[in-house]
Every structure is written in C-alpha cells, then in structure tokens.
Amino acid sequence: MDLDLLSQLVVSNQSKVLLVVMDGIGDLAGPDGQTPLEVARSPHLDQVAESGICGFHDPVGPGITPGSGPAHIGLFGYDPYRYLIGRGVLDTAGTPFVFAPGDLAARLNFATRAADGSILDRRAGRIGDAEGQRVLARLAKEIKELSGVQVLFQHVKEYRAAAIFRGRDLDGRLCDSDPQQEGLQSIPVTPTAKEASAEAVLAAQLANEFIAAAARVLADEEKANFVMMRGFDTYQPLPSFTDLYQWRATAVAAYPMYKGVARLAGMEVIEAGQQSLADEIQQVEKAWAETDFVFLHVKKTDSMGEDGNFAGKVAVIEEFDALLPRLQALRPDVLCVTGDHSTPCAMKSHSWHPVPVCIAAAYARTDTCRQFGETPFLSGGLGRIHSTDIMPLLLGHAGRLRKFGA
C-alpha cells in the first residue's frame, strides 16, 4: 500500500499493538513429516492461532529469498524494493554511532587470512566482544584518514564491526569483498553499476585502500589479521514510523541489525538488559505503559535454522511459548506473531518459502486454525499476503484507520 495514502487514513487512539517477529520461523517438514512449529509443544501459540486469523506472507515476493534487512523493512510497511538499505548502515544504526548525512558505511568482518592470501576463517574464530573491540581500537588508532576522507569505526558485536567514510560524496553501490567461502581470496571492491559514477569509483578506491591498510596494521594478530567488507551503503533514514502511523513505537531486540532497522524508522530502541529472551520480555513489560506499538525480535529461531539444528529450533519455540503468557497479560489490543523470513533447518539458510503469520484481536475474523504451524495455516483466513500488507492490517484491527472515501 502507498505509504502516503495509508498515513492519511491513520487516526490516533488508545489501542496498543504488539508485533512479535520470530526470526526465520518458517521451515519445512522434518523426518517425521512435521515442521519445528508443529513438533513444538506450544499451547499458548496454539491459543493465539485459535483466537486469531492465520496465513502466510511473502517478505519480498514469491520465489525471492530475502535478507534480514528487507524482510523487516516490509514488516514495518515500507516497500523493500524502494527502501533497500545496506547491511553496513543497518548494523551501524543498531549501535550508539551518530550518522551524518552522506556517510558511507560498510560492515566489517574480522577474518583470518593465510600467508598465500586465502581466507582461513571468515569470522576470525568467532572472537568475542572484548577481543573485537581491542582489535578495532588498533585500526582506529592507525587509520584516521584515507585520500582526504575521514575514517570512523564502530564495534557492532563479537567479530563484526563497521567502517564509516565521511567528508566526500560517495556512492555505496559496491560489491562485497567477502568471498562467502573459506579457502578463497578476498574480492577487490568494485562498483556494481554498469556505468559507475565517479563517486562509486572513489568509494571503491577507498575501500580497497582501507582493506590493504587494515591488513598491514593487523598483520601480527593470530586470528583477526584481516578484514572483509560487506553491505556498503550511504546513510539515509526511513520515513518516520511514528509520524506515519501517529503512535509511540518501541523496539526490543538483542542484535544490533534489528535495532538498526527500528532506529532508522524512528522507533525508540531499548538498549540494555537483553541477554536472554526472558530479559527481552521484561523490557517489553517495562516499556508497555509508555508506548503504543512494540516490536519484539526473537533471534535464536533463525540461528538454529542456519545451524540445521531442528531440535534446537523446537526448543527456542517452546521457550518463547512458555513466556508468551507474560505478553498476553499485557492485554495488547492487537497481537501479531510472525517471522521475517523462513530459515529451513534442512537448507541451513534463508529461503523463499512464505512465512506463517497470525493476527489476534477483538475484531479478528477467526478461521479453522487451531495450531500454530505451517500445515494448519494453509487453510487460514488470511491466505497468502505480502509483508507490506501486515502493517495496514494491524492498524485496521487496532481501529487506527478511518474509512476510505465516502
């Protein structure tokens, strides 16, 4: 739906909406013919399904496998094709870093490089936060400017960081240097457009210069002796989520990238106290009285899917289900439980499969679904919708949209 039209229909009231995003929740049947959602003992999710209207959404489009960024963009009502944001900006926005207009950001992965230049470990042994911060401090001390452009740094999480280039007009349409596979050489950064702009040529030059400089600085490191750059983009905030929908909005997420999407949309992001799923629930409880919309992100369903850990994914679903009554006790006027994309355990990656979604509200038109799972939802009343349809549906069920036309 057109954002301008939707915004014109919005009315403010006292209703409260809770959007729970179980990352990567969609899956395929395992050996016994059931998905993790269907195997899990989840009576409270089943209760939500029974009291709501169920179906599936396509995060980007049928057959298209989405990244986490565009998948969340769509859930918040923005067209993921129009508002495509690079991972460098998303990750950095999820930290305390303050962007300036025109900043070019890239995600950094610390990596281990062999003497022959091949990548031994794309994640530098998954070094922890303290080690990642120490190594990044070495870079920040030695690399302050390249070709007259200021270089800034921000630690993100563990082996992940960000480099931000400031002071020149730069074009972020660049390829990643990460080969996505161990044993291969780092890829030179080049513009992706067929007719590259001068700003993209300069940005690629800076990126390659930076990678070479970082390799010299980190040459004596045992693990993090190299960096790879991904997700180049220039900073541009999204249209304000709070202004569009006329409500106070809060995000509770443990991982920086999801905080970043929410912050770019203008939500208030809860920063601390989210080491566990129970901690996240507690933050929702604390924020509830002072907000109208809460986005709660559950990460480990996706992590288990990417690890191919079917039993682990079941366990995360059951852990969330046991905590769900605390969210229900807040009495949201609209409760939506869904995912950003599917991450089938058999594939160990994001996939194109449509994502389960359920909306429970006082005026929801219920269907025949009595279990929260992919097979039951095939007969759900929502059918198969686009992710950008979810936000209008939440607003409508919350009584926050006026009638269109006479």
Image: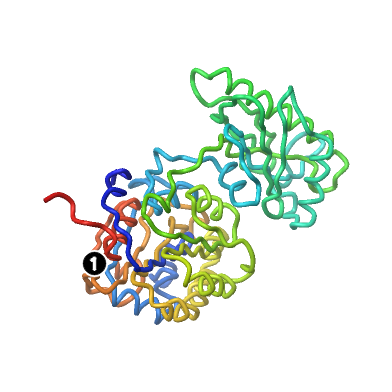
The residue positioned 40% from the left and 43% from the top of the image is 80
The residue type indicated by label 1 comes to Ser
Q: Position of residue 396 (x, y in %)?
A: 27, 61
Q: Nearer the viewer, residue 281 or 216?
A: 281
Display colour scheme: rainbow
The residue positioned 52% from the left and 65% from the top of the image is 298
Q: Is residue 25 left or right of residue 357?
A: right
Using the image, determine if residue 167 lies above or below residue 125: above
Using the image, determine if residue 150 lies above or below residue 23: above
Q: Is residue 171 left or right of residue 132?
A: left
Q: Nearer the viewer, residue 52 or 181?
A: 52
Q: Position of residue 332 (x, y in %)?
A: 38, 73
Q: Nearer the viewer, residue 226 or 321?
A: 321
Which quadrant of the structure image shows residue 382? bottom left
Q: Position of residue 88 (x, y in %)?
A: 60, 42
- According to the image, label 1 marks what residue? 379
Q: Position of residue 126 (x, y in %)?
A: 72, 55
Using the image, determine if residue 347 lies above or below residue 14: above
